[in-house]
Image (cartoon, helix red, strand yellow):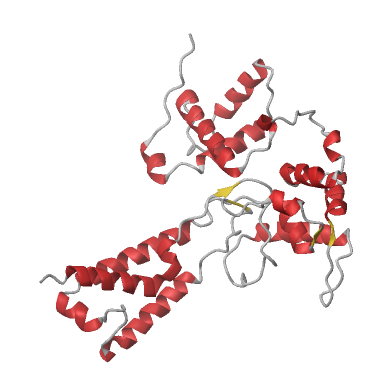
Amino acid sequence: MSNEPSRAYITKKILQRRYGRLLKWRKPVVHNIRGPFHPDVFDGFAFDVALSIRVCEETLQDLTDEEFFERFDLRGEVSNETHILSERLTLAELKAVFQQEPVWFAGGFGVEGREADVQHWARMQRWSLDEAVALSIGYEPYGDLLDGADGMPVQNDVLAYYYKRRALIEDNFDWGGEASPRKNCVSDVVRWFDQVVLDVPQQLLAAADKYHALGIGKKSKLGCSSSADDKPLDPRERSTMLKMIIALAMKGYGYDPSAERSPTPTEIESEMNLLGLGINLDTIRKHLRSGATLLDDEVFDNVRPSERIKKE
């Protein structure tokens, strides 16, 4: 009778015991919303985790059946005292790797899956300071952002942006003290957001306006209609838009995202101006860079930009 099924089962238990949730860990998708933007901040950790799991699997595969079953029990735990020390060292090494996991906001606050439920929060009557800061940036409030984040990798400018935003909102309202914190009226906070033209999600302003009759929607600077097509893009729609932009730039203009300098942004700017659709050159460059971050490494390595499509 083959031992393969039971060996595969035990191997699965070993990996679960050693890696836990990191077996299902995937590199977060970071969108450029507001504040610093570092989409590659998780690359190193993603590589380390994948490499560690692969090495572990290959090491287990290299054991003979006799060595494997002599070392591990059905729960994936070391059953032989002579191997307990080596297993402890293995777990200690893995723990050191896991401690290098960046916090979720390490590369910026526009992390896919962390978006604020603005419809829910706009229906509230009062917000705490932590809630107001989180919603003003665009992520779902999870209590104090820094709880449990001590010593975990995060870009300094991301933290600086958070502290600056928090200090600004804290200074303009009475939030009470640590012993007796208080909340402030949503209508007051949102009116202040609008009054000082703070860079906050437009969806938040619109939802708060709807539920609290603030009247701020009547002051739209762009004169946009309220049709469904004019609603701000959610992160998934924005990701789709950026994919279209980078595909058209590469295959239509011969844009090379890896080039230090490219004439493509200037060409696009010129043609947009000819159509009466002027867009700032820096904005074009920003969207091209954001689109390039969505390319898979394999695609990026194998798909080269085409020559520009010739005009008739």
Whether residue 72 is visible, yes or no, is: yes
Q: Position of residue 110 (x, y in %)?
A: 62, 50
Residue sticking out furthest to the left: 1
Residue found at x 32% / y 73%: 13
Q: Is residue 35 visible?
A: no
What residue is rendered at 69% in x and 23% in y? 278
Residue 43 sits above or below residue 70 on the image: above
Give the residue at x 36% y 62%.
51
Count of all numbered marks drawn on residues in the image: 0
Reply above or below: 101 against 300: below
Against 177, is 163 above or below? Answer: above
In the picture, measured across the screen, residue 128 lies left or right of residue 240, that is: right
User: What percent of the width, then of the height, locates residue 25?
Assistant: 45, 61
Residue lying at the far bottom of the rendered structure: 81
Left or right of 2 on screen, residue 146: right
Figure quadrant of residue 285: top right
Q: Nearer the viewer, residue 253 or 183?
A: 183
Residue 234, image quadrant: top right
Spot occupied by residue 126 in the image (x, y as percentages of width and height): 82, 59
Picture coordinates of residue 6 (x, y %)? 21, 72
Q: Nearer the viewer, residue 168 or 80?
A: 80
Q: Which residue occupies the foreground of this view, 29 or 43?
A: 29
Residue plotted at (40% across, 70% down): 19
For the N terminus, the image quarter is: bottom left
In the displayed structure image, the side of residue 303 where residue 218 appears, left or right: right
